[in-house]
Amino acid sequence: MRCERVATKYERSDREVYKLAVLANAWIAELSGDLERARIVLEQLGKERGFETDVDRVLALARVYERLGTPAYLEHAAHIFRFLDRSFEKLSTLGRLAGVYRRLNNRERADEYEERFLTAFRRRMHRVSEADVATVAAWRYLPLAELRRVQLVPVEAIDAENTQSSREHAIRAFLRGALDEARTFFGRGGELLDRKYLADLALVQGDVPGAVASFVEVLRDDPDDPRVLASLLDHAREAHEVLVAEVVGSTELRSRLVANLATSIRDTPLAEAPWRNMATLRRLIGDYPEAERCAERAHALEAAARRDSQTIGRVLAAAVFHFIGKAKGLIHQVWVDRTPTEVGRGGFLASDDILGNVTLEMKQSVRNTFFAVREYARSRFPQQTRDILHYDYTYKVTKEDEPSGGLSAGLPTALAFLSTFLQRPVPQDIAFSGVLIADSHDALVVRSIGEAEYKVKGAYNRSLRVIVLPAENRANRFESTQVPRAVCEEIVRFAYTLDDAVRLTFGEGLWLR
């Protein structure tokens, strides 16, 4: 009634307020379960001049049509989404179209829009394809060994007629494992860039002496390519060191190579590789004190990187934050540390030891999870947790720009505690979300969460290998309009219990230790 009064008052004087009042009227009807009234209100608004193609109105109407669910209304919803796709190229529209056509049993159209949705989604998430890599690598040297580690989107088979160059064809052949074919096409070029790739290819195929000799020749022609120098210095070992020392020790190249490596170090001072290469270069030219200093720095950075990649008590948690009414997936960390205490007097987590911007509800949930996982660990892993009461524990949530609350952090919190109890690192390419319920001291169940599709989207955007969700969310994975089916199948794994999550995290071998 209030919405209708506002609409009547502003119908002629302020069309924006009038529209908002009518939309609110329809929204209240939809929330109340009166979908037919919501449909009538929105359709009537569309008959007024200026609101025929209003985006807010048609989006609300399409949602109502989807909920009504009859074939006729689903066709109306598809018509609206096709209009939005043509007019605005909105990504979620493709997912909605795929879902509508699946409900209409039009598999051909559903597959068409699902494929478009997948392609557009991967592009939005900055995933590159073999063709993208080949296009870039055809004009700029990218070491082949590094290209193998890039997560690439598979594309159609190589079409020799449409490939722009033999070098591009060679790179795509290499990415597909056809090394002999790649060598043939690289050999047709004969340019400096082709020679770099041929040296790389020899290295990949195990011909280290041939690769070193080729890199030496290439370095003489192009001493300013840091990647070529890095590849050469990486293999300046034993018998090959004499050949490398001959070229890097020459007077005209020495200062130039040192300056280039110094630039790389200034650009990426926390990267281990430039320091290691500088240590090798300094040793080859006889500057042993500086070589020792650079080697120590490289060793320290390597140890730090290894520690950061597999840290005990650090677990990635999938979360959602809301910005201007829109939900966004977010991946942050939960941390657990322990400090020694008097033997047999520890094993506790005090409220003051739960750090970060967390709500009271979450503080209570974290303490409950701590005690449940402590007893679970002592029951499941008695040998590894004999000293569990010799320490007191501290818990921290990152992402302090807004309060963290809710119960979906239960699963990552449990694994952070378990990682600390067992002193086992958790891989940093896997995220978790789930509510943890203690059925007994040795049986912890993972229950469903909300907004799972946004968390999957956040994990994919972070380029994570896996996200573990509650098994109760399994039925929703094909209904999401935010994430394509193929992406869900690629990275989502499900857990019924904490045992399942432990297997996915630490492997089956943990139970045999």
Image (cartoon, rainbow, N blue to C red):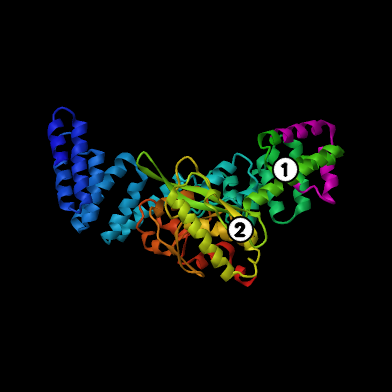
Relative to residue 432, is residue 6 depicted above or below? Answer: above
**253 in magenta:** yes
Query: In the rendered image, which residue does mark 2 sit on?
Result: 420
Query: Magenta part mainly helix, strand or loop?
Result: helix
Q: In the shown orientation, is residue 466 left or right of residue 511?
A: left
Tell me, yes or no, if residue 57 can be seen here. yes
Instruction: Please name the residue shown 55% across and 66% down the image.
Output: 375
- How packed mark 1 is, by other alpha carbons closer than 10 Å (few <14, some 14-19, many 20 or more), is some
**Circle 2: element type:** helix
Which label was assigned to residue 230? 1
Q: Which of 202 and 120 is in front in this view?
A: 120
Residue 21 place in picture, x, y as percent:
19, 38
Find the magenta span and give its range.
234-263
Label 1 near label 2: C-beta < 8 Å?
A: no
Q: In the shown orientation, is residue 271 left or right of residue 479?
A: right
Q: Which of 97 and 172 is in front in this view?
A: 97
Amino acid type assigned to the residue bearing label 2 in the image: Thr
Q: In the shown orientation, is residue 406 left or right of residue 234?
A: left
Q: Residue farthest to the top?
A: 13
Q: In the shown orientation, is residue 227 left or right of residue 506?
A: right
**Circle 1: element type:** helix
Which label was assigned to residue 305? none
